[in-house]
Amino acid sequence: MRRPSRLLLALGTTLALALAASGCSAGAAEDRRPGDSVTQAEAQTLAQLLYRNHQRGGADFVATAPYSDEAMLTLTGEIDFRRSAGRAQAVTSFSDGREDDTRTLFFTPDHVWVGDVPGLADALAGAGAADAVYLRRPVTTRTAAGEPLLIDVLVELLLNLSAGTADQPEAFLGGGYSWLGQRSIDSRLTSVFSLREGRTVAVSASGDLLTQFVTPLPGTDVDVTVTLSDHGPRRLDLPGVEETAEAGDHPDLAAGFGV
C-alpha cells in the first residue's frame, strides 16, 4: 500500500496554516457572488476553525486519495483531536477487478498500527509473537529513511485538522481567500471557500464546523478529500503491548503484508 513516487509530502505547518485560513459561516449567502473576498465575520470564523475541532474533541471522518487511475484509498473512522489518536478501516479499491484490500489502522503522530490483515496473526505467531495481531511502525512522513506512504500522508493530514489555540482573524483578510458559494455535503448545508494552492474548505451552517477539506498533494494533480461529521469527544484505546509486534523486528513480514 505504498504511495506512488510522484506523491511528495509537503504537509504539516503549511497545511495547518492554510486550513486555519479557510473556514467561514455558511449562513447569510444573500448578495454574495462566487469569488467574493472573505468578510470580517468570516475571518472571525476561520480563525477559530481548527481550534474549534480541538474544543469539540474529535469527529468521525472519511478520507480519500487515489493511488493511481486504477486504485483508490479510503480511510473511514474516528479521531480524537485532543489526544492526537485515530482509528480507521483502510480500504484500497481497484477498478481492474481485483478484490478490495481491507485492514484496520490505529495511528498517532509517531506510529501506525496495522491489523486485521488475512494471515498476519498466524504469520506473527510463527515468528514468535504468539499474541500479536498488529504490526506497529513509525509514521514515515517524519523521516528521511524511506518514501512516505499514502496512508501516512492521510494520517498526518487528519492529525493537522486541530490546533490548541485560535489564530488572528486579521491574518485571513485580503489574502487570496474567497467565497465559492453554498452546497450540501452529506445533507449538511455548507459554505465553500477557496484557499491558496488549489485548496478548498467547506464549513457547516450549523456551528461553523469544518465539514470538508480538499487539498492537492504538492507537485501533483492528486486531490485528498477529508470529510468530518459528528464532532464531539472521542476516547480511543490503542492496541496494547501484548497485541503488538514491531515491524522493525519482523521486516520480512512487514514487507510481505504491505505494512
Image (spheres, rainbow, N blue to C red):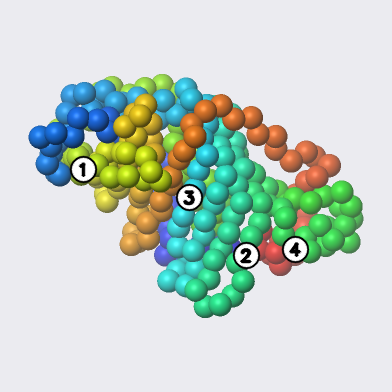
Mark 1: few/some/many CA within 10 Å (<14, 14-19, 20+): some
Task: Give the residue pinned by disc 4.
Answer: 118
Q: Which numbered disc, 3 or 2, marks the residue that appears first in the sequence?
A: 3
Q: Which numbered disc, 4 or 1, marks the residue that appears first in the sequence?
A: 4
Disc 1 from disc 2: Cα separation? 37 Å
User: Quick one: quadrant of the C terminus?
Assistant: bottom right
Q: Residue at x 21, y 23 (%)?
A: 41
Task: Give the residue pinned by disc 3.
Answer: 63
Q: Amino acid at mark 2?
A: Asp
**Where in the figure is residue 148, as x and y percent of width and height?**
52, 55
Q: Is residue 222 visible?
A: yes
Mark 3: few/some/many CA within 10 Å (<14, 14-19, 20+): many
**Where in the figure is residue 36, as x and y percent of width and height?**
13, 39
**Where in the figure is residue 53, as x and y percent of width and height?**
45, 29
Q: Amino acid at mark 4?
A: Pro
- The mark found on residue 101 in the picture is 2
Decide if residue 63 is on the left or right side of residue 189. Answer: right
Disc 1 from disc 3: Cα separation? 23 Å
Q: Nearer the viewer, mark 4 or mark 1?
A: 1
Q: Residue at x 48, y 31 (%)?
A: 231
Q: Which numbered disc, 1 or 3, marks the residue that appears first in the sequence?
A: 3
Disc 4 from disc 1: Cα separation? 45 Å
Residue nearest the observer in this picture, 49 or 220 = 49
Helix, strand or loop at label 3? It is strand
Q: Amino acid at mark 3?
A: Ala
Task: Give the residue pinned by disc 1.
Answer: 181
Quarter of the image holding residue 251?
Answer: bottom right
User: Quick one: quadrant of the N terminus?
Assistant: bottom right
Helix, strand or loop at label 4? It is loop
